[in-house]
Amino acid sequence: MLTKIDHIGIAVNSLDEAIPFYEKVLGLSCEKVEEVPTQKVKTAFFALGEVHLELLEPMSEDSPIAKFLEKKGPGVHHIAYQSDDVQDQLNQAAKEGCKLINETPVDGAGGKKVAFLHPKSTFGVLSEFCSKS
Ligand code: ZN
């Protein structure tokens, strides 16, 4: 079962360039910067109420974020839904004919288990399921 929107992922070319906008213009504070080797990204998290913003900078040229930036430029990359059972959520989505990027959850930022649904099955919105912690 989905429990809330956990975070919104935003692709950026450079965290160093993007973070000041969120801090100075929006007045948010960066909670942490963390590398996520499984996704080949460096992330920066900002809390806003229950929801986080996750800035994503590619760590290498073969990072999915590098490919996204190349194709579409910086911008909203994905929406992450918190689930009380990510594997069960994936199984249900697959049963409904949804194309999965991850058949089983992988390690995401903050020690969370994460998995993505293919945007072709989600009306163009890359969708992530993530665990509570
Ligand atoms: Zn995410």
Image: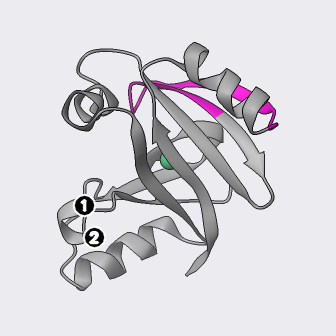
Pointers 2 and 1 in contact (C-beta within 8 Å): yes
Amino acid carrying mark 1 in the image:
Pro
Q: Report the residue marked by disc 2.
A: 122
Pointer 2 local density, CA inside 10 Å: few below 14, some 14–19, many at least 20: few
Q: Quadrant of the N terminus?
A: bottom right
The answer to whether the beta carbon of the residue marked 2 is less than 8 Å from any atom of ligand 1 is no
**Residue at left offset 55%, top offset 34%:** 55
Q: Position of residue 88 (x, y in %)?
A: 44, 75
* Front-lying residue, 64 or 111: 64
List x then y, in percent, for residue 42. Answer: 51, 23
Q: Is residue 78 left or right of residue 47?
A: left
Q: Main secondary structure of the magenta part?
A: strand
Where is mark 1, residue-wise?
A: 119
Percent x, y of residue 25? 74, 33
- Up the image or down, 79 lies above or below 98; here it is above
For the question of whether residue 15 can be seen, the reply is yes
Q: Residue at x 47, y 58 (%)?
A: 79
Q: Secondary structure at mark 2?
A: loop
Is residue 33 at all visible to an observer of this figure?
no
**Near-viewer residue (95 or 117):** 117
Rendered image quadrant of residue 20 = top right
Q: Secondary structure at mark 1?
A: helix
Residue 104's disc number? none
What is the three-letter code of the residue carrying label 2? Answer: Thr
The residue under the point 24% across, 60% down is 118
Point out the stretch of residues depicted in magenta: 27-44
Q: CA distance from mark 2 to mark 1?
A: 5 Å
Note whether 82 is above or below 11 in the view shown: below
Height in image: 80 above or below 52? Answer: below
Q: Is residue 43 magenta?
A: yes
Q: Is residue 65 magenta?
A: no
Neighbour tally class for label 1: few under 14, some 14-19, many 20 plus, Cα within 10 Å: some
